[in-house]
């Protein structure tokens, strides 16, 4: 009897000794994120930690003021307890991660309490990055190239729309095309990245959303990937979505974080993913950058021509032409940020924001309207896609140069680490 009591006490002591002060702080952080989910339904994008923590958050429904006060106290503790040694890179990144994520949580609390931030202030506070500004003249240069490529009368957007209409995936072929795209992305990814055997996901087709695709990470290396079929889906979107949501994008990022940080190290803070936080810039940036890592331009066109165009019933001979025009649209992606900045700062209204997207981002009207709904729901989150991709690209270029093998190595390291936007900076 006494022996059992002794063993139990020793067991308790042992587990208490295993948990570091940082682990305890991380647990508080997770609970704060879950508490925020009670005030903001989009906030908790994924959670696969202890289920009772979520139930506790639902029952407690802590007020925003109390959440903010605890976040402030945790930040004070973090500022006092610097990581043990700068040589331990992951421990340093963990400390930086918790600090930046908590600061962003406090910024989101203040927004829910009614504080008004400009687009740039909000982007800095939530995503740890400063979005660049672009002028109409810069976009006009690209539009002029479109004019040369697609000459004719009437508005450019109509000519562009007519050109693209030949590349819509018929609805009854969508699933087949999408699955072939996922196979292609997965094959290329597993050649370079070891994934746990159990990883898997399901694909669902949905309607009535402001986004075009979404990955809902479930934990245990599983994802649910949803594809929105409200609007016609063009052939380029198949590979984009498959890489972005699946391999080597969100699914792989979440799987690697779960494996390396949550399971191997017991870092519970990575079992929750707050959407409006710096982690999103890394998530979206790596997901978009991953498309180019898995499919460099020439390889992409070949795969589209040989595999996806035939699966979609499109003429493979048109693949080159389509991707030549499609390459130009990349330069217009920042026009979407400008529409968001102007609309959220109140300098243009909703109709003008849609008009701006039609004119400078070449979005057809229904897509422009869908995008304005996205901007209303997710606000400055829009920067995470293009600025995120550019910041990740610059980071990988700097560390790996043009060697494809090295690029995969550095990319996998980034996907497996708690690095945040300001940690992509050359000086860190
Ligand atoms: Zn995404």
Image (spheres, rainbow, N blue to C red):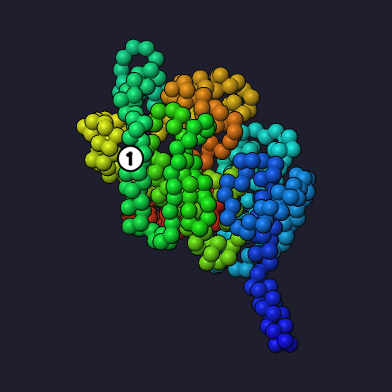
Q: Is residue 6 visible?
A: no
Left or right side of 189 for 334:
right
Q: Is residue 62 above or below residue 234?
A: below
Describe the element under mark 1 as helix, strand or loop. helix
Q: Identify the residue shown where x is 69% and y is 76%.
A: 12
Q: Position of residue 165 (x, y in %)?
A: 34, 24
Q: Is residue 343 visible?
A: yes
Quarter of the image where the N terminus is located = bottom right
Q: Position of residue 416 (x, y in %)?
A: 48, 58
Q: Position of residue 198 (x, y in %)?
A: 43, 60
Q: Which residue is mark 1?
A: 176
Q: Identify the residue shown where x is 56% and y is 28%.
A: 373
Give the residue furthest to the top.
153
Q: Identify the residue shown where x is 33% and y is 35%.
A: 173
Q: Dividing the picture into quarters, in which one does residue 306 lie?
A: top left
Left or right side of 251 for 65:
right
Relative depth, front residue between 130 and 179: 179
Left or right side of 100 for 1:
right
Q: Identify the residue shown where x is 58% and y is 22%.
A: 350
Q: Is residue 355 above or below residue 238?
A: above
Relative depth, front residue between 351 and 38: 38
Q: Dividing the picture into quarters, in which one does residue 407 lie?
A: bottom left
Q: Is residue 338 above or below residue 194?
A: above
Q: Position of residue 322 (x, y in %)?
A: 29, 30
- For label 1, the crowd category at 10 Å Cα-Cα, with few meaning under 14, some 14 to 19 and many 20 or more, is some
């Amino acid at each position: 009897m006494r022996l059992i009591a002794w063993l139990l006490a020793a067991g308790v002591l042992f587990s208490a000794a295993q948990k570091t002060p940082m682990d305890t702080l991380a647990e508080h952080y997770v609970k704060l994120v879950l508490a925020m989910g009670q005030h903001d339904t989009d906030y908790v994008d994924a959670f696969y930690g202890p289920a009772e923590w979520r139930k506790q958050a639902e029952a407690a429904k802590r007020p925003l003021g109390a959440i903010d006060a605890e976040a402030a106290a945790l930040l004070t503790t973090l500022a006092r307890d610097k990581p043990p040694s700068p040589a331990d890179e992951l421990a340093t990144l963990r400390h930086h991660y918790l600090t930046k994520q908590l600061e962003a949580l406090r910024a989101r609390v203040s927004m829910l309490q009614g504080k008004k931030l400009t687009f740039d202030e909000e982007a800095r506070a939530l995503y740890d990055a400063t979005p660049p500004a672009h002028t109409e003249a810069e976009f006009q240069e690209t539009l002029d190239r479109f004019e040369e490529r697609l000459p004719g009368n009437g508005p450019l957007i109509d000519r562009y729309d007519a050109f693209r209409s030949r590349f819509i995936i018929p609805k009854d072929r969508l699933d087949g095309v999408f699955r072939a795209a996922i196979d292609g992305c997965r094959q290329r990814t597993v050649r370079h990245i070891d994934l746990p055997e159990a990883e898997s996901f399901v694909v669902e087709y949905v309607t009535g959303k402001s986004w075009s695709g979404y990955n809902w990470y479930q934990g245990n290396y599983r994802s649910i990937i949803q594809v929105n079929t409200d609007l016609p889906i063009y052939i380029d979107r198949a590979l984009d979505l498959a890489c972005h949501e699946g391999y080597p994008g969100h699914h792989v990022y979440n799987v690697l974080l779960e494996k390396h940080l949550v399971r191997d190290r017991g870092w519970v803070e990575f079992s929750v993913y707050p959407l409006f936080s710096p982690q999103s810039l890394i998530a979206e940036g790596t997901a978009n950058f991953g498309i180019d890592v898995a499919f460099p331009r020439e390889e992409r066109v070949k795969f589209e021509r040989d595999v996806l165009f035939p699966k979609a019933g499109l003429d493979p001979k048109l693949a080159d032409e389509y991707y030549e025009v499609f390459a130009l649209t990349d330069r217009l992606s920042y026009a979407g940020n400008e529409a968001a900045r102007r609309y959220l700062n109140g300098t243009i209204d909703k109709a003008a924001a849609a008009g701006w997207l039609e004119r400078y981002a070449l979005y057809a009207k229904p897509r422009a309207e869908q995008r304005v709904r996205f901007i209303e729901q997710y606000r400055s989150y829009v920067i995470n896609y293009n600025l995120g991709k550019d910041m990740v690209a610059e980071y990988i270029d700097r560390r790996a140069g043009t060697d494809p093998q090295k690029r995969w190595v550095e990319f996998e390291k980034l996907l497996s680490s708690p690095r945040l936007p300001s940690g992509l900076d050359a000086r860190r």
